[in-house]
Image (tube, rainbow, N blue to C red):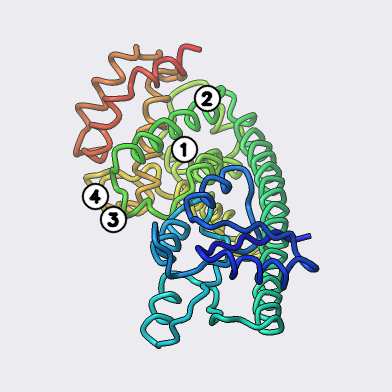
C-alpha cells in the first residue's frame, strides 16, 4: 500500500483526509511541517498533501525545501488551498507542485487527483527503471566490445612486432608512454579543445597499431642487422602510408568509428616533424594531427633508449637531452615541455 503524508494545521481537515484516503492508502497525518521533516528522515511517502496556509511555516516554504533537497525532490506534492486565484496556482506549479486541490475537498475529486498523479509516477518510475536496466546492459556490451577490440588490437600489433625482431616490446612501451602523456595533457588542459571528444582508452588502444604498415615491409629489410641503404630506408618510410591504407580498408568494410580514425592518424603521422621535414607528407606545425605529434615523442624516446643494429642504447638522460634539443624542430614545443614533467615516469617504464 502506498503511503501519503497529509500536513495541515486543521485537525478537521486531517480527519477528513484520513477518512477519504484510508481505504486505499496508508495515511499519516501531521499538524506541522516540522513534524513532517522529522518523519522524512525515516519514512519516504509516495505523495504529500500539503496545506498552503499554516502558521509556523507556510506550504510554499515547505515546497521549496522539498524540491531543493536531493533526498525529497522526487516526492510529488499536492497543495491544499482555499485560495483559487491564478497567481497562487502559477507560483505553486513553478515551484514544482504536482497539482492543487481546493478546500473543502470532495472524496471523488481528491481520490482521482491522487490516483492520476501516482499512476503517472508509476509509469515514470517504470520507464526510468527500464532505461536504467537498458543502460547497464549497454555498458556491459560496450565493455565486452572494448575488451574484444583491445584483444584483437593487441594480437595484430604483436603480429607486426614479432616480424620486427629488432625493436622488442616497442609497442607495449610506447603505449605506456602515450598513456602517461594523454592523462597529463587532460589534467593540465593542454590542447583541451582538440581533445574534448577524445576517449583516452580508445586512443591508447589505437596507439598499438601505429606501426601497422610494417606488416608489408619485407623481413630482409625489417630485420637487417646493420644500417639501411637510402633505398631501403625509403621502403621502411612507406610503412606510414601502408598503415593508413590498411586501416582505411578496414574502415570501408567495418564502418568508421573513433578507434579507426585515431589509429589511422597515428599510423600515418607519427613520423612527421614539427618543422615540416618529416614523412610521408612533410606536414608542419599544427597541420600535423595531434595524435601524431604525441606519438612522435613516445616513439622517438623508445628508439633512443633501445639498442638498434646501427647504434647502442642511449641513457635516459641523453634521450631527454636529444628531445629537448629537437624542441620546435622535430617535436611540438608544448608537448616537449610536458614530456619533461613526466620523463621520470618514462624512465621507470623503460627500466622495468
Marks 3,4: beta carbons within 8 A: yes
Disc 3 crowd rating (10 Å Cα; few below 14, some 14-19, many 20+) is few
Quadrant for residue 108, please give it.
bottom right
The image shows residue 107 at horizontal and vertical percentages of: 70, 80
Q: Which residue is mark 3?
A: 287
State which mark lies toward you, 1 or 3: 3
Quadrant for residue 155, please give it.
top right
State which mark lies toward you, 2 or 4: 4
Q: Which residue is mark 2?
A: 167
- Secondary element at image label 2: loop
- Secondary element at image label 4: helix
Up the image or down, 312 lies above or below 342; here it is above
Q: Which residue is mark 1?
A: 232
- Give the mark, 3 or 2, whose residue is nearer the N terminus: 2
Q: Nearer the viewer, residue 119 or 276?
A: 119
Q: Which residue is mark 4?
A: 285
Q: Is residue 331 left or right of residue 314?
A: left
Amino acid at each position: 500500500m502506498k503511503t501519503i503524508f497529509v500536513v495541515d494545521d486543521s485537525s478537521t481537515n486531517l480527519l477528513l483526509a484520513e477518512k477519504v484516503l484510508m481505504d486505499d492508502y496508508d495515511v499519516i497525518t501531521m499538524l506541522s511541517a516540522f513534524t513532517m521533516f522529522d518523519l522524512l528522515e525515516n519514512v519516504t511517502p509516495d505523495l504529500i498533501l500539503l496545506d498552503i496556509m499554516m502558521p509556523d511555516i507556510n506550504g510554499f516554504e515547505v515546497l521549496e525545501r522539498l524540491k531543493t533537497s536531493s533526498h525529497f525532490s522526487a516526492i510529488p506534492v499536492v497543495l491544499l488551498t482555499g485560495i483559487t486565484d491564478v497567481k497562487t496556482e502559477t507560483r505553486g506549479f513553478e515551484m514544482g507542485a504536482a497539482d492543487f486541490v481546493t478546500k473543502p475537498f470532495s472524496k471523488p475529486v481528491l481520490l482521482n487527483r491522487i490516483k492520476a498523479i501516482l499512476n503517472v509516477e508509476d509509469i515514470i518510475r517504470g520507464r526510468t527503471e527500464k532505461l536504467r536496466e537498458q543502460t547497464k546492459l549497454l555498458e556491459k556490451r560496450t565493455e565486452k566490445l572494448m575488451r574484444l577490440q583491445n584483444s584483437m588490437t593487441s594480437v595484430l600489433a604483436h603480429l607486426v612486432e614479432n616480424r620486427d625482431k629488432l625493436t622488442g616490446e616497442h609497442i607495449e612501451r610506447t603505449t605506456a608512454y602515450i598513456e602517461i602523456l594523454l592523462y597529463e595533457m587532460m589534467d593540465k588542459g593542454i590542447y583541451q579543445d582538440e581533445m574534448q571528444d577524445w576517449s583516452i582508452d580508445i586512443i591508447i588502444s589505437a596507439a598499438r597499431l601505429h606501426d601497422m604498415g610494417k606488416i608489408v615491409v619485407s623481413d630482409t629489410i625489417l630485420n637487417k642487422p646493420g644500417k639501411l641503404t637510402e633505398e631501403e630506408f625509403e621502403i621502411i618510410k612507406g610503412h606510414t602510408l601502408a598503415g593508413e591504407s590498411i586501416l582505411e580498408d578496414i574502415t570501408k568494410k567495418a564502418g568508421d568509428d573513433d578507434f579507426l580514425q585515431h589509429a589511422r592518424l597515428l599510423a600515418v603521422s607519427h613520423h612527421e616533424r614539427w618543422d615540416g621535414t618529416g614523412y610521408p607528407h612533410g606536414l608542419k606545425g599544427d597541420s600535423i594531427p595531434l595524435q601524431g605529434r604525441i606519438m612522435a615523442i613516445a616513439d622517438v624516446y623508445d628508439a633512443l633508449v633501445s639498442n638498434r643494429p646501427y647504434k647502442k642504447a642511449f641513457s635516459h638522460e641523453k634521450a631527454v637531452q636529444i628531445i629537448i634539443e629537437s624542441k620546435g624542430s622535430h617535436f611540438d614545443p608544448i608537448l616537449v615541455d610536458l614530456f619533461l614533467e613526466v620523463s621520470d615516469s618514462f624512465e621507470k617504464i623503460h627500466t622495468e
